[in-house]
Amino acid sequence: MSSRAVEVLFRYLELHPEISAQASSVFIPRARFHSGLEQFPRPGLCLMQSFRPNAAHLERHGYSLAANAPASADLVLFLPTKQKLESLYWMARSAAVLRPGGHLVVAAEVQLGAKSYRKELFSLLGEGDSWSKDHCVVSSAVKNESSFNQSYVTELLTQGGIRPIEGTSYKTQVGLYGWDKIDQGSRLLITHLPAADLHGNGADFGCGYGYLAVEALKKAPAISAMSMIDAESLALEACRLNIEAISPKARCSYLWSDISASSFEQQYDFILMNPPHHNDRLQDFELGRRFIAQAHAALKPGGVLNLVVNDFLPYEEVLQKHFAAFQLLANESGFKVLRAVA
């Protein structure tokens, strides 16, 4: 979701003050901070945000976050993510909790499929209003019994949330990065991962639904404990399910944290990582560099980092800067597997 869409959404509400004025309860899933939130009374405002950097931004401005959607709401505001199936799932949840006569307002950039989301909104609730500005479209519809499409809501709800990855034993969460498959790079890392490195206290930085951690636990009974760390709390939910399925008694902790902005002590014997190189939809090589630097800070002296990255990513320089030594374990299928010793 973009800051541009957030701005256009609140501009739309300024142009239609009756929408907010009639709402004593407001629900905003995947909420982003905006000064316009101040117009809503706190007791009636329910904000959900599972991505730690965005959640922290809201908390810094004094907003509390809810773990669950409310039972009902007079107004729901939603900005779709880059994952369409996830966005449709949240639109369906929003439509389900909306009270009769309440508004569901959706804002998105045109390049993110705003016109498609307008069509989906009207399919859920019936025809409504639409407004375009700054390459964004805001769509609004009112819930009423005659046009509310309960069967479509039910269909979208069954497609979202926790679900299995076809052909595997893994569960995943719709909307996570690579949520519907085993990542090819992660599979390559496990193939070339030295079993001797997997002992003591380990961590999976950016664990996602837990593939690296699960396969490491299968491969090495010498692992005494593992920390699963991710900025997306929905990823941690899926990760916990996958680890408990293969090792219910494993000493594992699940940390909701923005790794790039966290402070780490030298506590781990090994770290596994398939670092992100996108921030929203944009390539961000610096994000991967920060992950590598943070891994060094978190490793004990002599601890080992094993990671996989796309072969075009220039991370050797940062490895050389922070680590005592590093080596290339594999370079194939567009990925390279690297091992570094702190």
Image (tube, rainbow, N blue to C red):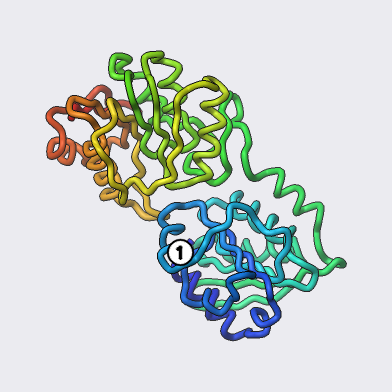
Q: Nearer the viewer, residue 74 or 146?
A: 74
**Residue drawn at x 83%, y 66% as measured from the top left:** 147
Name the residue: 63% across, 43% down.
161
Q: Is residue 162 above or below residue 141?
A: above
Please identify the quadrant where the C terminus is shown: top left
Q: Position of residue 2 (x, y in %)?
A: 46, 64
Name above or below for residue 212 compared with residue 69. above
Extreme residue in the right direction = 146
Residue at 71% across, 71% down:
74
- The number of numbered discs placed on residues in the rendered structure image is 1
- Position above or below: 58 against 311: below
Amino acid carrying label 1: it is Leu
Q: Is residue 73 left or right of residue 238?
A: right
- Helix, strand or loop under label 1: helix
Does residue 46 sit above or below 323 in this rendering? Answer: below
Of residue 49 and residue 167, the one placed in the foreground of this image is 49
How packed mark 1 is, by other alpha carbons closer than 10 Å (few <14, some 14-19, many 20 or more), is: some
In the rendered image, which residue does mark 1 sit on?
A: 58
| 309 displayed left or right of 243 | left
Tell me: 327 left or right of 176.
left
Asked whether residue 306 is in view, the answer is: no
Residue sitting at 15 percent across and 40 percent down? 317
- Can residue 88 be spotted in the picture? yes
Write down the quadrant of residue 271 in the picture.
Answer: top left
Residue 53: x percent and y percent? 40, 56
Q: Nearer the viewer, residue 243 or 89?
A: 243
Q: Where is residue 208 in the image (x, y as percent from the top left)?
A: 46, 38
Image quadrant in which you'd find residue 71: bottom right
Residue 341, position as x, y percentages in the image: 19, 27
